[in-house]
């Protein structure tokens, strides 16, 4: 016996109607794209036709989709009847738009995968202690640059969402971009979790050793950074997922009200201002691409102009201070010092020759950016200067919390270590090496000096007999009288302390750690005799400097912090609105 | 069929299609001076306009009704007759004002065409 359920039947009918409507509109959107119709027009046509279809179906009740196509007319027929003609030029425009859209989405996995591949390269910094070996502070310091990438990309995806939010009708086939954006957010979350688990799993011994070697602050800062970046990422992802589930799935035709995900805009300030000077591979280039896109689409506001200017000026300031530092270091005449610099978000291995051209490029970009922005702002009659704007309670709380976490994750005393020198000796065929090494140390901190050698042999049956002595002198810049000297002999016998594979082991020859309270010059001398039957040794000398620096040490950190806070309370309105308001007041 | 005749035929078809599409909205407004339901409007429009290639689909005419409704030129009400919902459309006040203007324009176009014919007669 069958029971008649009117509510169920009505729901089934509604589902069927919606299915027919959505299928028809998807086909229509595809046809409109093929004909090169402008995006705004596609949106209005689809929204209008959706109402027509609803009315039509409720009145004429087509049996199925093919019946609907026959009676209501196919999308091709609809376009022909409404004089929507195919234009080759307009179609080219649509193809370009689709290609750019695809590229803008592909950028995220490309940067992430590139970063993973960089990450997968075994760390070049082998940190060998007499008792234990370290796999490098890089791993233990929790890969700060990847936090920059994760944070930057999450904000980039948010910007994509803002761009595509109201771009298409909900019936447009391209509306699926919102699902892709959702997947990208979760892809980043997975990537983030992978990095956290990997770092703390692979390097747990290193982290423990760092903790025991007076590097507690670095470990703690690393943990805080991971947490801060993770919370920012998860909050944004959850907000978006929530919005997607609540609004998009219902395909609500009414205008969507503002949701908390839309208020994450404050983070864009941190993203743009840190993009050039923070070492996030690809992020700086991404910002330049976004800036070009903004100029081309003419969607420039006073805020965009000031944000771009500030980012470029911060880069310019950082470059000028780099130039000064490099000149000073070159005057001292040492061969080895840290020449790595972050220029437009890219870490360069030898910045000596790049800094000056980069200053010129930055200056040119400031001028070009300003000229373009001023022209567009004047054309659109938009405000150049901002006005004070206090946001509403809940929005303000969430924004300030997220901005603070983002600043913790991205700013601060990074990097925590600097490889001052890394020197491969030539393959040693003679049995004695006498070397004098001088290095300039830029600031107070802790020095880790490591001298080791790799041998391409299995660990078994190898002993390396060493004879010789070493001494180390430290000459501070400001207080030459506080010079100190340490000396000692090499141990007569060294056991292999680390092996990367069965056929390659690393011997620690000498390891030393000392605290310095100022900038200065370190001189390391050693005389080493190998009483060894092993030919072709490749001794490697490494000196790493872990600066003890407070947060917001650099002026650009301070600038970014202050700019973010100030910009958070400012807003830009259209000039036109102000005039109309004034004229209304005058009329009264 | 000779090539010239074929070209003429194509041009004529094109012109008729353009004319039909051009006056479609105007025609619907004229018809809606009296309250009519959707099906009625579809049939009347088809019978009044010259046949076009491609033929005028229901969707095209129905979309015009939606557009007119969105612009508040037409009002609509729904009524269930014999278990089927029927939607009735009628010209609104705003629509009447617009239609009056459109009729004036149309009349002046007809006059212009007559004048053009007169001055071109040999």
Image (cartoon, coloured by chain):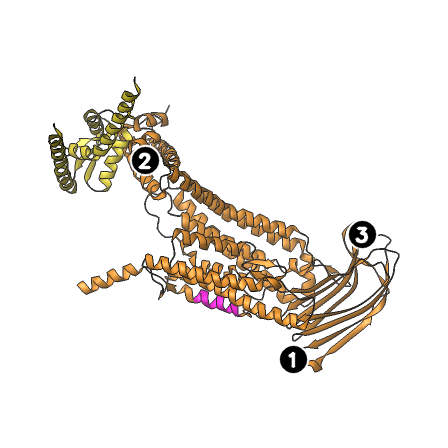
Chain colours: A orange, B yellow
Where does the magenta region start and end? A555-565
Dot 3 lies on which element? loop
Residue at 62 percent across and 49 percent down: it is A117
Q: Which of pointers 2 and 1 indicates the residue nearer the eye?
A: 2
Q: Which of pointers 3 and 2 indicates the residue nearer the eye?
A: 2
Q: Which residue is mark 1?
A: A478
Q: Position of residue A128 (x, y in %)?
A: 74, 61
Neighbor class of circle 1 (other Cα within 10 Å; few <14, some 14-19, many 20+) is few
**Subunit ID for the residue under disc 1:** A
Q: A481 or A379, which is in the foreground?
A: A379
Q: Which residue is mark 2?
A: A84
Q: CA distance from mark 1 to mark 3?
A: 45 Å
Residue A190 is at least partly visible in this image = no
- Residue A477 falls inside the magenta stretch: no
Tell whether A391 sits left or right of A118.
left
Q: A165 or A469, which is in the foreground?
A: A469
Q: Which mark is residue A456?
A: 3
Label 1–label 3 contact, CB within 8 A: no
Q: Earlier in the sequence, mark 1 or mark 3?
A: 3
Which quarter of the figure has residue A14? top left
**Subunit ID for the residue under disc 2:** A
**Subunit ID for the residue under disc 3:** A
Above or below residue A470? Residue A86 is above
Which quarter of the figure has residue A21? top left
Residue that extends furthest to the front in the rendered view of this protein? B122
Q: Quadrant of the N terminus of chain A?
A: top left
């Amino acid at each position: 016996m069958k029971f008649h359920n009117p509510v169920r039947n009505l729901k089934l009918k509604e589902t069927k109607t919606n299915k027919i409507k959505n299928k028809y509109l998807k086909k229509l959107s595809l046809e409109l794209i093929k004909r090169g119709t402008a995006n705004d027009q596609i949106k209005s046509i689809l929204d209008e036709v959706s109402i027509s279809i609803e009315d039509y179906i409720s009145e004429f009740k087509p049996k199925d989709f093919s019946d609907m196509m026959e009676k209501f007319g196919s999308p091709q027929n609809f376009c022909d009847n409404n004089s929507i003609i195919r234009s080759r030029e307009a179609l080219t425009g649509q193809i370009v738009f689709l290609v750019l859209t695809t590229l803008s989405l592909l950028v995220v996995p490309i940067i992430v995968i590139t970063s993973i591949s960089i990450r997968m390269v075994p760390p070049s910094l082998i940190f060998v202690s007499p008792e234990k070996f370290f796999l490098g502070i890089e791993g233990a310091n929790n890969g700060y640059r990847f936090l920059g990438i994760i944070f930057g990309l999450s904000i980039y995806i948010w910007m994509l969402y803002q761009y595509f939010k109201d771009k298409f009708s909900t019936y447009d086939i391209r509306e699926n971009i919102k699902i892709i954006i959702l997947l990208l957010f979760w892809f980043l979350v997975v990537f983030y979790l992978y990095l956290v688990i990997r770092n703390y799993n692979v390097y747990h011994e290193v982290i423990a050793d760092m903790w025991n070697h007076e590097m507690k602050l670095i470990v703690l800062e690393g943990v805080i950074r991971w947490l801060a970046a993770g919370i920012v990422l998860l909050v944004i992802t959850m907000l978006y997922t929530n919005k997607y589930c609540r609004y998009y799935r219902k395909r609500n035709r009414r205008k969507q009200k503002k949701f908390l995900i839309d208020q994450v805009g404050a983070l864009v300030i941190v993203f743009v201002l840190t993009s050039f000077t923070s070492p996030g591979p690809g992020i700086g280039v991404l910002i330049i691409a976004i800036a070009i896109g903004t100029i081309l689409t003419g969607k420039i506001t006073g805020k965009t102009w000031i944000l771009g200017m500030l980012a470029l000026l911060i880069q310019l300031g950082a470059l000028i201070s780099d130039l000064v530092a490099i000149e000073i270091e070159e005057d001292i005449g040492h061969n080895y010092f840290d020449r790595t610099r972050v220029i437009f978000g890219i870490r360069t291995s030898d910045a000596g020759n790049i800094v000056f051209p980069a200053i010129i490029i930055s200056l040119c970009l400031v001028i070009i950016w300003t000229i373009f922005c001023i022209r567009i702002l004047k054309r659109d009659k938009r405000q150049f200067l901002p006005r004070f704007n206090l946001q509403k309670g809940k929005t303000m709380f969430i924004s300030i919390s997220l901005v603070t976490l983002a600043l913790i994750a991205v700013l601060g005393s990074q990097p925590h270590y600097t490889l001052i020198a890394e020197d491969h000796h030539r393959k040693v065929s003679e049995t004695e090496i006498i070397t004098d090494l001088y290095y300039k140390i830029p600031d107070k901190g802790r020095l880790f000096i490591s001298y080791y050698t790799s041998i391409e042999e299995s660990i078994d049956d190898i002993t390396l007999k060493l004879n010789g002595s070493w001494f180390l002198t430290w000459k501070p810049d400001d207080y030459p009288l506080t010079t100190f000297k340490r000396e000692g002999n090499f141990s007569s016998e060294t056991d292999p302390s680390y092996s990367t594979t069965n056929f390659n082991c690393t011997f620690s020859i000498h390891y030393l750690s000392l605290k310095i309270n100022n900038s200065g010059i370190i001189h390391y001398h050693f005389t080493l005799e190998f009483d060894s039957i092993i030919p072709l040794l490749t001794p490697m000398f490494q000196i790493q400097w872990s600066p003890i620096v407070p947060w917001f040490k650099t002026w650009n950190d301070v600038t970014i912090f202050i700019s973010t806070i100030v910009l958070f309370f400012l807003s830009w309105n259209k000039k036109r609105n102000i005039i109309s308001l004034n004229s209304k007041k005058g009329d009264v | 069929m000779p090539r010239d005749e074929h070209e003429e035929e194509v041009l004529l078809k094109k012109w008729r299609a353009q004319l039909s599409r051009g006056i479609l909205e105007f025609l619907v407004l004229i018809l809606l001076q009296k309250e009519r339901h959707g099906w009625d409007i579809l049939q009347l429009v088809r019978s009044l306009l010259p046949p076009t290639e491609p033929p005028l689909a229901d969707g095209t005419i129905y979309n015009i009704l939606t557009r007119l409704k969105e612009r508040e030129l037409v009002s609509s009400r729904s009524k269930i007759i014999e278990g089927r919902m029927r939607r009735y459309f009628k010209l609104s006040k705003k629509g009447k004002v617009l239609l009056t203007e459109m009729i004036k324009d149309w009349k002046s176009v007809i006059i212009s065409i007559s004048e053009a014919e007169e001055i071109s007669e040999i």
